[in-house]
Image (cartoon, rainbow, N blue to C red):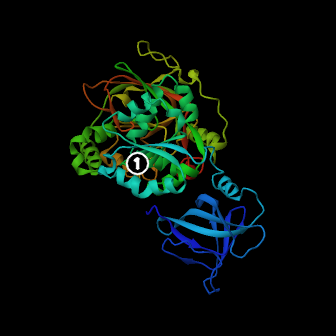
Amino acid sequence: MSDKPLLQTLSRAIITQSGIQLSGNWHESSYHPLFCCSGPSSDSSIHRTIPYHDILFAEELDSSASDGDFGTREIELTYVARNNKIDLKKEIVIVTDYEPNLSQTILQKAYGQTDRTHPQRILVLINPHGGKGKALRLFEDKAEPILKAAQCEYEVCTTLKHQHATELIRTRKDILDFDTIVCASGDGIPHEVINGLYQRDDRAECFEHLTVTQIPCGSGNAMSLSCLDTNDPAEAALSVLKAPSVRIDLMAITQPSQPARLSFLSLTYGMIADGDIGTEWLRFLGPFRFEVGIVTKLLQNAKYPCDLSVDFCAKDHQLLSQHYSDNIKSDYSKTQHLPITDQSFELKSPSLENPPPTDWERLDSQITDNLSIFYVGKMPIVSADTNFFPAAIPDDGCMDLVITDNRSSVLDTANLLLQVDKGTHVLQKDVIHSKVKAFRLTPRIPKGYISVDGESFPFETTQVEVLPTLLKTVMKEGTYAETGFRSYS
């Protein structure tokens, strides 16, 4: 995408409820400023509307309108046009309107869905190794031109090592000068950013003020797929500017060997973790390494014994479907939430030195002795074509839990995994699909993997609980991407 929008000119524009309605004669120029209404009329008369959602910037020009009408102004519009891909364009239009600050009125309508300031002050963090080393180019070619065209104030920082984003966010003194932190990466950088904020002394103020979002430039891109409904950096950049803010739950993870950490996406133990973290040595295969790892463990009929205690909210499919119906909304940006304070970070579960509460359920040993997949998440789409948690809700105070064990046949488990793109795997008879508030898992094998947001965590007792509505992020329509759960639940 060029960051020099093609300049087009049109004769007349009318301000409407849905956008700028254009009619008149137009032609394209190679970046020459052409005057509206110049030249004779032709058969190229057009009538169309530029939706406010597509308008990035509007500026009133000093020159008077060429036809000399009283009350007319020339407005230069910068907007996105879609023709199989997103392109940037400019139009100089003549508007007859007596609004004293017409360009500001247009911008207010263009950015009316968001509570963030315009132009936004954005800190962009890029993992140059993300997306097979293409993250920086993806940002510069597809996303940055949109930020520039919208006249955003932004700063780009490149991470140099693992956990560098956590260090940057934890120590940066001017972090509250920004409105939004954009992670131009896969899911590792959002995880690091959230934990960098969590480790700050002023974390309550940071979580209250800052928005954290993603422009998909990595391999997983779950935050963008779930919240912005896209894997395209240009579309995501537009949503970063335009979409409403939504507060979502996070998961707090406690382990003996390290301080509590936060997760926005998922935690997995067993076959899925083996297929992810356990195949790092096959990274040269690209995303195919995950399938190789899963098939290998499936054919081995691998099992991952553990002890598991759970604080259930909705244990079976019927209760979960009712919970979903009671809590699902079409737009979470309109939901009122309490301000973030120091009390928002207090953990309610007992310390690991103490046993789980008596009202938590210890799962049947026939399940935990033969456990195959243990996967818990807060966002529905964990990667492209992987709709693993189709009933996930942004702020229901629960995690979605999926469990299988190896007493199912290899064929049944394989069939289950083939349905994760549609999300119908959760309907299978051998799948435990629940809503949970907290759990404690203790592995009963000497070595293995625990994966959190795609990051390897210590292989030890792990306790997780929900921290409600802690993170402010961006959602394209004020809710998660459509998963289909409503139609088949």
List the residue tagged with mark 1: 383
- 69 vs 143, left or right, is right
- Write the residue at 56% across / 21% down: 342
How busy is the neighbourhood of tag 1: few (under 14 within 10 Å), some, or many (20 plus)?
many
| Image x and y of residue 299, in percent | 24, 44
**Furthest residue toward top:** 353
| Image x and y of residue 462, in percent | 39, 24
Depth check: give the residue in front, 45 or 458: 45
Q: Quadrant of the N terminus?
A: bottom left
User: Is the residue 431 above or below the residue 52 in the image?
Assistant: above
- 65 vs 255, left or right, is right
**Furthest residue toward front:** 63
The three-letter amino acid code for the residue at tag 1 is Ser
Depth check: give the residue in front, 31 or 348: 31
In which image quadrant can residue 309 be found? top left
Depth check: give the residue in front, 314 or 209: 209
Q: How many marks?
A: 1
| Image x and y of residue 423, in percent | 46, 49
- 441 vs 466, left or right, is left
Element type where label 1 sits in the image: loop
- Write the residue at 27% across / 30% down: 448
Asked if one can make out residue 406 in the rendered structure from this viewpoint, the answer is no
User: Is the residue 254 above or below the residue 279 in the image?
Assistant: above
- 158 vs 223, left or right, is left
